[in-house]
Amino acid sequence: MTSAPETDETRYDFRAIEERWLPVWRETQPFRSGDPDDTRPTKYVLDMFPYPSGDLHMGHAEAYALGDVIARYWGQRGFNVMHPIGWDSFGLPAENAAINRGLDPRGWTEDNIAQQRSSMERYACSFDWDRVLATHRPDYYRWNQWLFTRLHEKGLAYRKHSNVNWCPKDQTVLANEQVVGGLCERCDTPVTKKKLNQWYFKITDYADRLLDDLEGLEGSWPSKVIAMQRNWIGRSTGADVAFVIEGRDEPIDIYTTRPDTLHGATFMVVAADSDLAAELVEGAEASVAEEFATYVDQVKSASEIDRLSTERPKTGVFLQRYAINPVNGERLPIWASDYVLADYGHGAIMAVPAHDQRDLDFARAMDLPVRVVLDVRGEDGEPVEDPAVSGVAAAGDGTLINSGALDGKSKADAIEAIVADLGAAGTGKASTNYRLRDWLISRQRYWGTPIPIVHCDACGEVRVPDDQLPIELPPAEGLDLKPKGTSPLGGATDWVNTECPSCGGPALRDTDTMDTFVDSSWYYLRYTSPGKTDGPFDLDAVKKWAPIDQYVGGVTHAILHLLYSRFFTKALFDMDLVDFQEPFSALLNQGMVQMDGSAMSKSRGNIVRLSEQLDEFGVDAVRITMAFAGPPEDDIDWADVSPGASSKFLARAWRLARDVASEPGADAAAGDAALRAITHRTMADCAQLVEGFRFNVVVARTMELVNATRKAIDSGAGAADPAVREAVEAVSVLLSLFAPYVAEDMWSILGHENVATAGWLEVDESLLVEDTVTCIVQVKGKVRGRLEVAPDITEDALKELALAEPGVARAIGDAGIRTVIVRAPKLVNIVTA
Ligand code: ANZ
Ligand code: ZN
């Protein structure tokens, strides 16, 4: 048998299909969500917005492919979906690129935005192009300034003279994360501390709420992210205890989580780089003062992480001063060391070497006494070895000894008793500390939002009135943008010199700009009413859309961006500007795209270019490959996937549409029952699977449906059977989530228009009921879900379905899975680790 050569009409040609539909979508804008008469229920699906630092890369391609599955799915389920995009376009990447190329950051940024937008359109992201924003444009950052002034009015924005990390070579402030082994991350110069006047947001006022409200996010945010947020806030409960200092009028407060060990304190340590240490060393012998000065210089170059490490040998200087233990009157020598941090608690501790490892290391290095005050037992019930001998502190729980009247009490009872005693004596009280610090928002850089404050000799810090906003950035021409420790804006003399809004006298503008995390802390609200000119957002619009139903983005933003956004939302709630307290109801963190086992980078030479992949395999094949590669949280190795195979699958699916020989609207009820059961089962399961983020399984199930349909055409019902049309229409709708071009083309071949609004198949339960079995899903022996499944369901499919059940996922929680025992079709038993 010979076959006719394939013509364009019969061959799957992704280039022709892309060329056919992209102009149509550009014209019709099918994902607009702003129609005020739209009565459908709403869903707000949000992808984290990108930096415009170049064209889209593989990481964007993954994130937007996955976010799009969710947005397009809810559209098919009859929701009015808002799926906006914008650009986080202020900040260092744009500024550095602009400096390196000698270009104005504005033009460079706008060019990149245009390029990325065009790539997003080609990539068929279902964005609502009526809602675009870019944070570097005055119509956006005007509202950063407005919000800053609101926070300033409430005392939540303030300026403080404080010690910051400073790179003497780059002449810039560094975040703690940018100090690596005491060196500047960028140029390897030893980092020093510098006292600078900086702007802060008082996020610490919200520490308790930021911590406590995490509970409500459990089950809808990755548990890993919740744990990271908790850690970052780092609430610690203990007591402040006042120690009298010989020769000093004021006692010194220390913070301890273990007031039960007060009788075991054998020395005191103050942070070497604190004002307190500097004061205490006055009056010591000259040689000690000198030793101390040298030591402090050395300490200033160490990072916080290094200082707290238990691995590091302990160092310090005895200050020749003594403190008096309030519970027994003992004289405790006072040392200065780097393992105590100046800005945590009170920058001073009572050292209890028997029960604290760092204190023990220090005591052993300096030959200081070790006194055990808790009888701590090992697993065998025997007392643990003497810490002074073993070098291992007895950190566990136990019964008090060597502690006078407290002897015999448990640790918890002792803590309670001693805090009460200290309270009665006026020498101590219960206290809470946080690892969280106030958010340092000022940057001495050009490419950011100017801080809307004017400094006046007569009036001090004056807020720029709302009607004078925005304070626009002066043009970059003539300014030296290179980092030099003071803001480049200082060079814009005409801009800096202004009139005091309060007294009208001469005054100076603040020359700092805001951290770009400020811009991204509220952008999700602006999308609800992007054109608004008399406020940052419209409360009614916010009420209609927010909070965000589904946020999608990288785990790299698991801490700061999410914490700052949560803080902003709570602060806005307190000002009656929004009516909810958590911005992101659900969060999905996608993994990274790697190549040959490691992150793509220029230096490794393993970068895969998105544009080349799209040219070779087409948008649809790349998108569906992203979804099919594995669970969305996992990293994808591009070396292990096969866009070529995806492309062949799409060709198979597309040919089905060409083969359908019944008319649109043909009554499927009269068609092949077996195929219909598969179609309806697939659509019912896939809804659940999408909602459980098991996109890879949805693709696999779509492939199965394609195969079953091909079989029905070739050896069963035949191409004219209306059940075949029903199946192929279902395939088109499923593919519309992953491969919009081929789906649209199939839909059009089938005689319809606009597949994005086709709607999910109305599942006919009667087709499922007949041959379904109830499957019980157990977690740790308890029934956590029931599934209606086909009697011949495969073990793999059943396992996937069971794990996608929300109740099951909740029951597994953080535990992790040890084994899944599948007895298809009736039982799935999950054993947690
Ligand atoms: C005595 C003691 C005995 C302590 C003991 C612990 C165990 P978290 O949980 O992180 O809050 N500490 C207090 N201020 C410090 C500072 N500025 N720099 C370094 N360490 C500091 O830790 C609180 C504990 O860390 C406090 O409790 C204090 O040591 C130390 F068996 O006091 B403890
Ligand atoms: Zn004034």
Image (cartoon, helix red, strand yellow):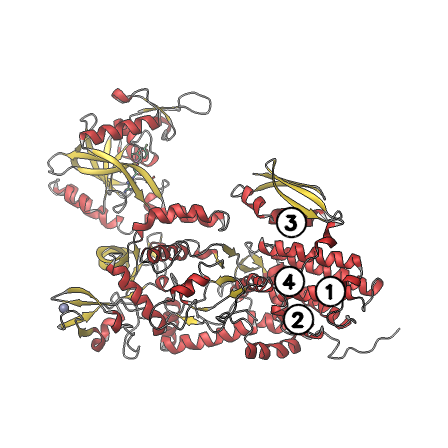
Q: Nearer the viewer, residue 275 or 138?
A: 138
Query: Which residue is under mark 1?
Result: 726
Residue at mark 4 = 760
The answer to whether the beta carbon of the residue marked 4 is less than 8 Å from any atom of ligand 1 is no
**Mark 3 vs 1: CB contact within 8 A:** no
* Residue type of the residue flagged with mark 3: Leu
User: Earlier along the polypeptide chain: callout 1 or callout 4?
Assistant: 1
**Which is closer to the viewer, label 1 or label 2?**
1
Q: Earlier in the sequence, mark 4 or mark 2?
A: 2
Q: Give the residue number, with chain letter if any, for mark 2.
A: 742
Q: Nearer the viewer, residue 710 or 359?
A: 710
The correct choice, above or below, for 388 with respect to 128 in the image is: above
- Asked whether 754 or 377 is in front, the reply is 754
**Identity, as a three-letter code, of the amino acid under mark 4:** Trp
User: Taking 33 as reference, is 148 left or right?
Assistant: left
Which residue extends farthest right? 1
Q: Are marks 3 and 2 in contact (CB under 8 Å)?
A: no
| Secondary structure category for the residue under label 2 | helix
- Total marks in image: 4
